[in-house]
Image (tube, rainbow, N blue to C red):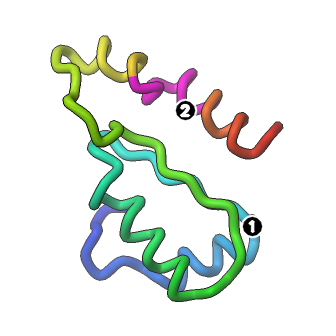
Amino acid sequence: MHTLQQIDKEAIVKAVRETKAIVTVENYNVQGGMGSIVADVLIQSEVPTKFTKIGIPDEFVAFGYLEKIHPHYRLDPHGVTKTVKEFLQI
């Protein structure tokens, strides 16, 4: 998604109905970001779904180059893939 404001609620609900699961991935803290906004939409829609947020946990954050930080938080391609597979149990 290119913006958090004026989020496309209909697209989110449509995706939930089609897939029965939503995973958000963001390069920031998982609290108060895109995942939180998507969670609000899901609650309001009352459509049953599996949902998880991938991002930096709400903790004191490691700092440095993204090439080093992303694997630490499983935000690199391998980490995101592994997390999604575990979440979906595939």
Which corner quadrant of the image does residue 36 belong to? bottom left
Q: Residue at x 49, y 53 (%)?
A: 24
- In the image: residue 36, left or right of residue 4: right
Which corner quadrant of the image does residue 37 belong to? bottom left
Q: Callout 2 environment at 10 Å: few (<14), some (14 to 19), or many (20+)?
A: some
Which tag, 2 or 1, sits closer to the chain's start? 1
Q: Is residue 76 magenta?
A: yes
Q: Position of residue 18 (x, y in %)?
A: 75, 72
Q: Residue at x 47, y 82 (%)?
A: 9
Q: Is residue 11 magenta?
A: no
Q: Nearer the viewer, residue 66 or 62?
A: 62
Q: Secondary structure at mark 2?
A: helix
Q: Residue at x 54, y 77 (%)?
A: 42
Q: Which residues are magenta?
A: 73-81
Q: Position of residue 39 (x, y in %)?
A: 47, 69
Q: Is residue 42 positioned above or below 26 on the image?
A: below
Q: Position of residue 16 (x, y in %)?
A: 67, 72
Which residue, given by chain and number where applicable, does mark 1 sit on? 20
- Farthest residue toward the front? 59
Q: Is residue 13 positioned above or below 60 on the image?
A: below
Q: Amino acid at mark 1?
A: Lys
Q: Name the disc covering residue 3, or none.
A: none
- Farthest residue toward the top? 68
Which corner quadrant of the image does residue 83 belong to? top right
Q: Amino acid at mark 2?
A: Val
Q: Secondary structure at mark 1?
A: loop
Which residue, given by chain and number where applicable, does mark 2 sit on? 80
Q: Residue at x 64, y 39 (%)?
A: 84
